[in-house]
Amino acid sequence: MYLFKELYHIVSKNLEERKSLSKLKPTNS
């Protein structure tokens, strides 16, 4: 359960980073 929680946290963090990146860079490569 704990591992799943950690994984979810990492994934959500990664998604947020990708969102901010796409905001800074409108062009997706």
Image (cartoon, rainbow, N blue to C red):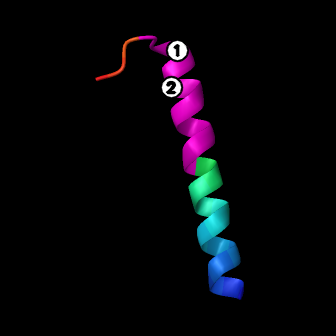
Dominant secondary structure of the residues highlighted in magenta in the image: helix
For label 2, the SS is: helix
For label 1, the SS is: helix
Q: Is residue 12 left or right of residue 14?
A: right
Amino acid on which disc 2 is placed: Leu
Give coordinates of residue 29: x percent, y percent. Answer: 28, 23
The numbered mark at residue 24 is 1
Residue lying at 56% horizontally and 37% vertically, measured from the top left:
17
Specify the segment rendered in magenta.
14-26
- Seen in the picture, residue 25 relative to 9 is either above or below; the reply is above
- Disc 1 and disc 2: Cα gap in Å? 5 Å
**Residue reaching furthest top?**
26
How many numbered discs sit on the rendered protein?
2
The numbered mark at residue 21 is 2
Residue lying at 59% horizontally and 26% vertically, measured from the top left:
20
Residue lying at 36% horizontally and 20% vertically, measured from the top left:
28
Give coordinates of residue 14: x percent, y percent. Answer: 55, 48
**Residue reaching furthest bottom?**
1
- Seen in the picture, residue 5 relative to 25 is either above or below; the reply is below
Give coordinates of residue 15: x percent, y percent. Answer: 57, 43
Q: Is residue 19 magenta?
A: yes
Label 2 CA crowd tier, 10 Å (few <14, some 14–19, many 20+): few
The reply to whether the C-beta atoms of the residues labelled 1 and 2 are less than 8 Å apart is yes
- Seen in the picture, residue 7 relative to 17 is either above or below; the reply is below
Q: Is residue 6 left or right of residue 28?
A: right
